[in-house]
Image (tube, rainbow, N blue to C red):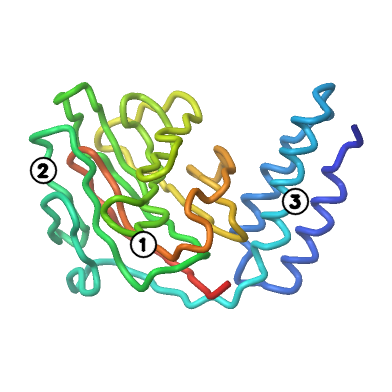
Amino acid sequence: MADLRPHLCHHLRLAAAKEGNRRADVAYLRMFAEGLRTSQAAHVGRARARAVMALALLVCAATAQAQDFDFEAGAEGWEPVIGQWAVEGGRYLQTDASTPAYRMSLVGEPWEQGSIEADATPLSENHNGNVGASFGLVVKHVDGEHWCAARFGSYGRCSLRIVGAEVGVLNLGTCLPDPGATYHPKVILRGGLIAIVLDGAVMGIFHDPFPAQPGRPGLFTETECAFDNVHIEGGAQ
C-alpha cells in the first residue's frame, strides 16, 4: 500500500491557502495524517486512509457561521436538557452529580456539519456507578432518543456515545482526566464523518450515526464540570 501522507498533506495545504479561517481544523488533520503509516493490512489501511482523506478535503468546504461564548454575560441561547446548569464566575457549570446520568446543554439550530470546541474543567469525580471525572461535547442531538456525544473520562475512557443507533459506545482508549485540570475537546462534523479531537490530537474518526438528520450541538458531562470559551462553526451541507 502506498504512503498517502504526502498526497493528503498536499490537499491540506491547498485547503489552508483557500480558507484561512480553517487553519485549526487543517492543523488537527495534518497531525493525524502524519501519524499514518504503511500497513500490511491493506484493506484496513485503505479504508482508514479514505476516511481521513474525505474529511480533510471536506473540512474547508462549508461556509460557516461562527459563534463564541465566554459566559461573562450569562448563557443566552443555551438550553439545558439534563442536569443543573448555571453561569458562575464567567463559566458555564453543571453541578449535579447525584446519579450516573448524561447531562447536556444544547445551543443553536440543528446542523448537519460544523465544529464545536471548548475549554472543559471536570471539577470532581462522580463515584455513583464509578463514572469518574467526565467532560465532553454533544455532536448531534436529533431528539431525546437519537443523539451522539464525544466523551472524555467517563468510566476511564475516551469514546463516542451513540443513543438511538445499533452501536452504543465506540471506545478510543483510556482517558483519566484530573479534577481541576482544564482540557480542550473539539469535534469536527463534515461530509458524514466525525473527528474527535483532544488538546490538538485527533483521537479518532467515525461515520456519522445519523447521516442527513440535522441535530443540535452542545456540552456534555456526567459529573460536575465547568465549560468556557466555546467556539462553534456550523454551515449547510
Of residues 48 and 186, the one nearer the viewer is 48
Under mark 2, the amino acid is Asp
C-beta proximity under 8 Å, tags 3 and 1: no
Report which residue position mark 3 lands on.
53
Q: Where's residue 200, x and y in %? A: 54, 46
Of tags 2 and 3, which is closer to the observer?
3
Report which residue position mark 1 lands on.
230
Q: Where's residue 97, x and y in %? A: 12, 37
Q: Give the mark, 3 or 1, whose residue is nearer the N terminus.
A: 3
Residue in view at x 28 percent, y 53 percent: 227
The reply, left or right, for residue 161 in relation to residue 202 is left
Q: Where's residue 70, x and y in %? A: 29, 66
Mark 1 and mark 2: Cα distance apart in space = 21 Å
The reply, left or right, for residue 150 in relation to residue 218 is right
C-beta proximity under 8 Å, tags 1 and 2: no
Under mark 1, the amino acid is Val
The reply, left or right, for residue 99 in relation to residue 168 is left
User: Can you name the residue that lies furthest to the right here?
Assistant: 2
Q: Give the mark, 2 or 3, whose residue is nearer the N terminus.
A: 3
Task: Check the image and report above or below for 143 versus 101.
Answer: below
Q: Give the mark, 1 or 2, whose residue is nearer the N terminus.
A: 2
Report which residue position mark 2 lands on.
96
Mark 3 and mark 1: Cα distance apart in space = 27 Å
Give the position of the C terminus as an image quadrant: bottom right
